[in-house]
Amino acid sequence: MTAFELVAILMALVALAGWLNAKTLHMPNGVAMLLLGILGSLALFGLQFLWPQMQTLRQIKALVDGIDFTSAVLNYMLAFLLFAGAMQIDLAEMRRRWLSVGVLATLGVAASIAIVGVGLWLAARALSIPLSLSWALVFGALISPTDPIAVLATVKHGKLSKTLQIVLQGEALFNDGVGIVAFTALLALATGNGQMNAFGAVGQVILEAAGGLALGVAASWLVIRAMHTLDDFVIEVAMSIALAMGAYAGAQALHLSGAIAVVGAGMLFGGNRAKAAMAGETEAYLRAFWTLVDEILNALLFLLLGVEMLVVPFLPGQAGLLLIAIPLVLLARFAVVLPWGAYYRLRHAERGPTLILGWGGLHGALSLALALSLPQGEERTLILAATYVVVAFSICVQGLTFTPLTRWLDEPYEIQSWR
C-alpha cells in the first residue's frame, strides 16, 4: 500500500467518525477519534482470539507498524498544530502571565520528572520488575510535559477564567520543548551515551528554548512587515504556511527548539500587529484556513494514536506497574501545580484553580511519539506500554470530564437555609 492510499483510508475514517460523532455522541472530536481507534483495535484482538487462523490482524498490525508515528508527529504535524494553536493565544494576556507560564514550563517539568521517575522506580522494585532509575527518569521526561495538542483542543471547550486558560495553554505550548531536551539528555544517560551534567543540561535547555523563541519571533516579525506591503489573501496565506514550516525547520537545523520557535512565531502572528497587516478579506481566509488545519490534523492525529494500540506491547506481568503509572503521573501533576493554585485561590478567590490546572494537564501524542523513538529493549517495552496507558486515560477520562468539571466549578455556591 502506498503512503497516499494509507492517508486516504485514514482520512475516510476521520470523515466517517466525525460524521457519526456529530450526529450521535457529540463528544470532543479528539476523544471520539481516539476511542474509535482503540475500539477498532480491541475488536481486531477479539476476532483474532476467536479465530486464530485469521490473517487480518497480522496484516493490519503490519500496516500500522509501518507507520512512522514519531516522524509523522515530530517532523510533519507538530509545526502546523503548534502554529495554529499559538495563533489562538491572547499575546497581551500571555505577557502578563509569563512568570507563571515560565515557572510551570521549566521548574514544574523538572519537578514532575523527578517525582514520576523516582516513584516508578520504587514501584518497579516493589513489584520485582527490572527497571533502573535512569530509565524511570526517561519515562518521567517524556510523560511530564503536558501535550499542547490535547490541551489546546480541550481547554477551548471549558469554562475558564482568562488567567487559568492562558496558564494552561501557555504552559502546554512551551513545556514540550523543555521536555524534549530533558528527554534527550536522560536517554543518553540511560543508554550509556552521555554523562549527567546538571549545569550543562540546564544551559542546553535555556539555549535551545531562548534561541528557538528568538528565531520564531524574528521570522514572524519579518513576515508581518512583508504583509503590510500587499493585499492578496492567497499570497498571505502562503506566507503563513512558509512561516510555520520555515521557523520549525530552521530552528531544528540550528539545533534549537523547533517547537518553541513555531510557538513564538504563531503567537506574534495571531496578535494585533498581524491583524493590522491583514487588509481586506485576508484575515477571514487566513483564520479559516488555520482553523481547518487545526481541526483536521487533530482528528487524524488522535485516530492514529488510537490505532497505535495494535503495536504497543502489553505484557501480563507488567499490568500492576502500568496501573500505578496513572495515579503516579496525576500525583506529580497536582504536586507541581498546588503552590500556584493555592496562591491564585487566595488572591482571586476563584473555585478550584488547583483542580483545574491538575486535571487539565493532559498528555497526548507527543509523549507516545517520544516513547516510540526509544531503542529496542526490555525498557522500551515497559515504557511504551506505560506511556500508552497514561495517554489513553488522560485523553479519554480527563479530556471527557474536563469541560463538565469547569462548568460545575463555575456555578455559584448554593446557600442552604436551615430552619
Image: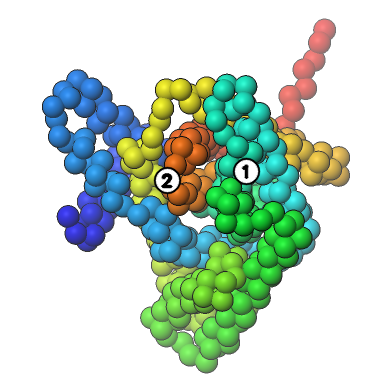
- Expressed as whole percent of the image width and height from the top left, the position of residue 352 reads 73, 35
Using a 10 Å C-alpha cutoff, classify the residue at mark 2 as few (fewer than 14 neighbours), some (14 to 19) or many (20 or more): few
Q: Observer-nearest residue: 373 or 226?
A: 373
Please state if 121 lies on the left or on the right of 108 as rendered: left
Q: CA distance from mark 2 to mark 1?
A: 16 Å
Please state if 10 lies on the left or on the right of 32 as rendered: left
Residue 141 visible from this viewpoint: yes
Residue 416, located in which quarter of the rendered image?
top right
Determine which of the numbered discs, if any, sits on residue 376 in the image: 2
Residue 140, located in which quarter of the rendered image?
top right
- Expressed as whole percent of the image width and height from the top left, the position of residue 274 reads 58, 77
- Residue occupying the point 23% across, 60% down: 3
Q: Residue furthest right?
A: 346
Q: Observer-nearest residue: 394 or 164?
A: 394
Please state if 174 lies on the left or on the right of 349 as rendered: left
Using a 10 Å C-alpha cutoff, classify the residue at mark 1 as few (fewer than 14 neighbours), some (14 to 19) or many (20 or more): some
Secondary structure of residue under mark 1: helix
Please state if 393 lies on the left or on the right of 261 as rendered: left
Quadrant location of the C terminus?
top right
Q: Amino acid at mark 2?
A: Gln
- Which residue carries the number 1 mark? 134
Q: Residue furthest front?
A: 192
- Residue occupying the point 58% across, 48% down: 190
Q: Give the vertical position of 379 relative to 280 (above or below).
A: above
- Expressed as whole percent of the image width and height from the top left, the position of residue 47 reads 21, 26
Secondary structure of residue under mark 2: loop
User: Mark 2 or 1 closer to N-term?
Assistant: 1
Residue 261 visible from this viewpoint: no
Residue 328, located in which quarter of the rendered image?
top right
Determine which of the numbered discs, if any, sits on residue 248 in the image: none
